Amino acid sequence: MSSTAAVNPPSGVAGVYTFEEKRKRIFAIVAASSGNLVEWFDFYVYAFCAIYFAPAFFPKSDPTAQLLNTAGVFAAGFLMRPIGGWLFGRVADRSGRKTSMVISVVMMCAGSLLIACLPTYATIGAWAPALLLLARLFQGLSVGGEYGTTATYMSEVALKGQRGFFSSFQYVTLIGGQLLAVLVVVILQQLLDEAELKAWGWRIPFVIGAITAVVALLLRRTLHETTTAASRASKGAGTMAELFKNHKAAFFTVLGYTAGGSLIFYTFTTYMQKYLVNSAHMSIKTASNIMTGCLFLYMCMQPLFGALSDRIGRRNNMLIFGVLGALCTVPILTTLQGVTSPGIAFVLITLALAIVSFYTSISGIVKAEMFPPEIRALGVGLAYAVGNAIFGGSAEYVALYLKGVGHEPAFYWYVSAMMVVAFLVSLRLPRHASYLHNDH
């Protein structure tokens, strides 16, 4: 069997699939998505459990430990994502998508298992935060490479005419990983008291993450490769030279709308809970309940907006996203600042996330459609990782800084301005996805 036989449609009419072919492709989507869910579950669990394990690794009396804490957050959240996007993109283009996805989930499993088993500072001193940093670097590298490879694979294996719908499950599982991490922590909070959580309970989510990563690994090992031997053997496959020599315009186009997309995504997801507490003056519990409900609806929206893109085209989805994001961000954030009703806040944030869904539902495939197979994973992964790290990763810092100096509304206009950039860059998108249309 050739490397692509299992995922290519039968000869004849393009886009016509046998029942067996449909079954294989849908299973491949499920297997790839499950790994994506596990990756993001493991990544988010760290953030949700940090309040419980931080004192065990970063005692205030040790400045070295505190510096390691700062370095770990920086390296894992910012530095490692672009490196992961480059490294795993190269592996995916030169050795195959399956190989890249398997290595990625193994690294995430190793990182979670290491954190779950780590001795504390009281046992091994400064080695404890150093090893925690190492585990977090592994996780940051893994999640940095996960996005590009999974987006590429899912776009290539999805059924023609339904690529937007099937590719949207990448964000379904990304958001699902975050919600699952929250759910596990909430359950543990009901079963254990705070002292137990700080002593040993915080390790349980990391054990769960490591076990589920093994399951994801087994599923991903069954995947069929979507690249051909010829594309993998191509001289420029997975190289920076090829990317910037022949696909520079595509790279910067993807980087441009990823910058705005990542900024508004983090604004209305991870930062929004803090915004409701600090600016709208709601209780932490109320803000948490609102965001849990909003994120659940947001997850459910993805297939709907992905299916919409199959009807109106990816370019139109992106243009609508840019226009609505530019026009609605300032009014929504300004209104939220003075809202006292949790119900109204829920509606406003859900509205904002619906606008963001025009982008996130097709985030992977709209990037994949810009590059040919031999450079696709690198182009998607690196452009996403750079845009995400610079603009998405800094969203909360910029928002809090501007609030601190008394110019909070400036952040609203900053997000809106980036939506204008996203709109202008989206005008450069092709009206038809020529590369993916020619793949199969």
Image: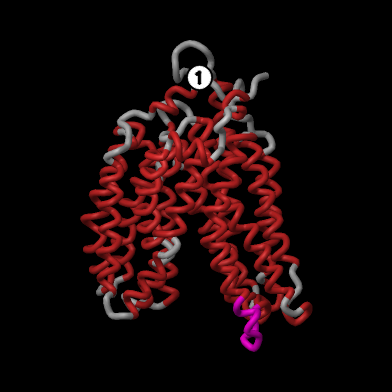
- Crowding around mark 1 (Cα neighbors within 10 Å: few <14, some 14 to 19, many 20+) is some
Q: What is the span of residues highlighted in magenta in the rendered image?
A: 58-67
Residue 400 counted in the magenta span:
no
Q: Position of residue 438 (x, y in %)?
A: 45, 22
How many marks can you see? 1
Q: Position of residue 264 (x, y in %)?
A: 35, 58
- Residue linked to disc 1: 17
Image quadrant holding the N terminus, namely top right
Residue 24 visible, this angle:
no
Dot 1 amino acid type: Tyr
Q: Position of residue 273 (x, y in %)?
A: 41, 69
Q: Is residue 286 above or below residue 75?
A: below
Could you say which is closer to the camera, residue 400 or residue 353?
Answer: 400
**Quarter residue 100 falls in:** top right
Residue at the (66%, 71%) spot, across then down: 202
Q: Is residue 153 left or right of residue 63?
A: left
Residue at the (58%, 56%) spot, across then down: 41
Looking at this view, name the residue that lies furthest to the right: 123
Looking at this view, name the residue that lies furthest to the top: 12
Which of the colour schemes (rainbow, by chain, secondary structure, one colour) is used?
Answer: secondary structure
